Image (cartoon, grey):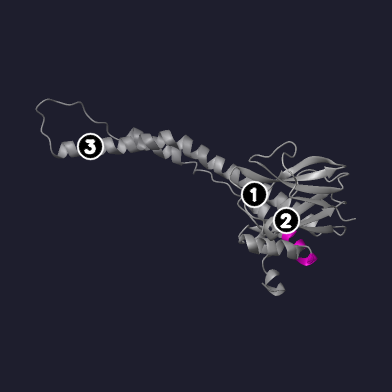
Amino acid sequence: MNAADLHTLTGAYVLHALAPDERAEFERHLLICPACAQEVRELAATVGKLGLAVAVTPPPALKQHVLRRISAERQEPPRVPGARRGGARRGRGLSRFVLAACLAAAVSFGGVAAWQHQEAREAREDARASQRHAEELASVLAAPDARVSGTKLPEGARGTVVVSQSRNKAAFLTSGLPKPPPGKVYQLWFDDGGKMRPAGLMDPAVTDNAVLMDGPVDSAAGMGLTLEPAGGSPEPTTDPLALMRFST
């Protein structure tokens, strides 16, 4: 993909609509394109505001409408031995069906409203989280004091760490990283003078990605990457796949 095409991907990137390889290429592009980084921050803020505007509220008159239908619907009369069947039976059957439908609607009304409210709340929370992640990641990649270091990873993959001391954050980008074995996950670490501090897990389903490392950089002089049991570990349990010193 040429540079001109990359400039057009800011919207798709913010909406998580890029394929993994396109996303990784665009995130590398953000390192050298302040204009795209600024546009990503602005679009992420807009997406967040749109997400906050999502709300699904049932019409206020729906409940009263259901209750009116119930009160107006003729109830089934008591059975009389030997009574004629036919049209009256069909009428009773229809009344029973309508009444059952109204009752079901009335009973489910509260559940539907609660489900809609929960869906809207989760959508807002997801939008906020996506906005925060995109903004923080872009701010690190485009920071004036961003320092970049690279290293080789297993099976010809590449790793790049970007550190911004002014934002006290670091991001880790991978290209071609093989998927971990079943039950394993790649874990990131900050190197605090030889003591490894957990810095987040990588998505095992993604080989090309950018991860905003968990926690502040503080006095860390480097970072590490290990293969850990699913869910991560409080401290490394395997030899590091990579150790990187932060560029100064």
The residue under label 2 is which amino acid type? Leu
Q: Is residue 127 left or right of residue 110?
A: right
Q: Position of residue 197 (x, y in %)?
A: 79, 40
Please state, as top left, top right, bottom left or bottom right, where the N terminus lies in the image: bottom right
- Which callout, 3 or 2, points to the residue nearer the camera? 2
Sequence-wise, the earlier of marks 1 and 3 is 3
With 174 as the anchor, is 118 left or right in this view? left
> Which mark is in front, 1 or 2?
2
Task: Give the extent of the magenta segment.
Answer: 32-42
Q: Is residue 40 magenta?
A: yes
User: In the picture provided, is 238 more to the left or to the right than 142?
Assistant: left
Local secondary structure at mark 1: loop
- Badge 1: how crowded within 10 Å, few (<14), some, or many (20+)? some
Residues at badges 1 and 3 in contact (C-beta under 8 Å)? no
Q: In this image, 138 relative to 81: left or right?
A: right
The residue depicted at 27 percent of the width and 34 percent of the height is 74
Residue 47 visible:
yes
- Which residue is found at the position 9% from the left and 27% from the top? 82
Whether residue 101 is situated above or below residue 23 in the rendered picture = above
The numbered dot on residue 153 is 2
When asked about the image quadrant of residue 159, the answer is bottom right
Task: Say which label, 3 or 2, has the lower sequence index.
Answer: 3
Q: Which residue is mark 1?
A: 203
Q: Residue at x 60, y 47 (%)?
A: 181
What is the spatial separation of the Cα atoms under label 1 and label 3, in whole angstroms?
56 Å
Q: Which residue is mark 3?
A: 93
- Residue 147 sits inside the magenta stretch: no
Q: Amino acid at mark 3?
A: Gly
Crowdedness near tag 2: few (<14), some (14–19) or many (≥20) residues, C-alpha within 10 Å: some
Q: Are marks 3 and 2 in contact (CB under 8 Å)?
A: no
User: Is 230 above or below relative to 170?
Assistant: above
Secondary structure at badge 3 equals helix
